[in-house]
Image (cartoon, rainbow, N blue to C red):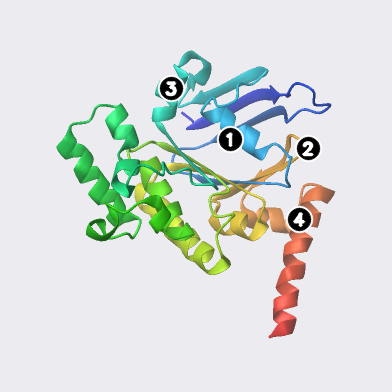
Amino acid sequence: MHAIEFRNVTKKFTGSAHHAVDDVSFTIEEGEFITILGASGCGKTTLMKMVNRLYEPDSGQILLSGRDVSTVDAVKLRRKIGYVIQQVGLFPHFTVGENIATIPRLLKWEKRKTEARVEELLALVGLAPDEYRDRWPSQLSGGQQQRVGLARALAADPGIMLLDEPFGAIDSITRTRLQDELLALQTAMKKTFLFVTHDIEEAFKLGDRVLVMNEGKVVQFDQAEEIIRKPADGFVKALVDSAKEKERFWENCG
């Protein structure tokens, strides 16, 4: 049974001349780290937001572990899926610990279990619990806030994690470190990750497979090495060539 399956999924927003997602079908296996790559407006975020029903498809089916998501209560579904965005979205009037405890409290976990989970997750994302638990989001750096956002998304131990350009607003040094930490986390936890990015180096570094989108369609879905070796069309080739050009630039600078 697949972790995630899209069957001929289509989405078009009112007033738009084009489909945001155009007859898309693919499968993702449990424990895979999938990156979704494409230019702005290609449909990658729309695709992701249909997994947890923030957007509803116009046609087609989306299945999680074989179950059509349209048959599941949307609120209950979202509580079982981790979701991390670029803007982090921490509650400013909640401490770090209270932010991480949001979903466990909604699920009515007992206090001791919730507190233990907060401690565990802070340690997991590299923030000492005694030092950071009672801080306010405004007292954290961008990288620290992103770590708290990741911890909050992991709080109820979801099987699927959705990450929408989570490192897009972070400086390059912190971004590289967070990418490495995220890879290690995913490998250790064996969860299914969907990670949206417009950065080809990030997509190729993180993804077990890379799903390349253009104008609402999936134009290639394969391992990075295969995409580099055999681009499916001119758009994918242009992406690969742009990455190679950057590499040549740094080689020449050296």
Q: Which residue is mark 3?
A: 75
Q: Residue furthest bottom?
A: 254
Residue type, mark 3 in image? Val
**Left or right: where 14 falls relative to 17:** left
Whether pointer 2 and pointer 1 mark residues with C-beta atoms closer than 8 Å, the reply is no
Secondary structure type for disc 4: helix
* Residue at (77% x, 27% y) in the render: 19
Mark nearer the N terminus (2 vs 3): 3
Amino acid identity at mark 2: Glu
| Foreground tag (3 vs 4) | 3
| Badge 3 element | helix
Separation (CA) of disc 1 from disc 4: 21 Å
Residue type pointed to by label 4: Leu
Q: Earlier in the sequence, mark 3 or mark 1?
A: 1
| Secondary structure category for the residue under label 1 | helix
Q: Residues within 10 Å of mark 1 (few under 14, many from 20)?
A: many
The spot of residue 149 in percent (x, y) is 42, 47
Instruction: Tell me the mark number nearer the camera, choosing from 3 and 1.
Output: 3
Q: Alpha carbon of mark 3 to alpha carbon of mark 1: how far? A: 16 Å
Residue occupied by mark 2: 215
Instruction: Say which residue label 4 marks.
Output: 239
The span from disc 2 to disc 1 (Cα, nearest Å) is: 15 Å
Marks 2 and 4, Cα distance to the nearest angstrom?
14 Å
Closer to us: 243 or 148: 148
* Kind of residue indicated by mark 1: Met
Q: Position of residue 66 (x, y in %)?
A: 47, 23
Contact, mark 2 vs mark 3 (Cβ under 8 Å): no
Residue at x 22% of width, y 30% of height: 109
Residue located at (52% from left, 31% from top): 4
Residue with the mark numbered 1: 48
Residue 36's spot in the image, x, y percent? 62, 44
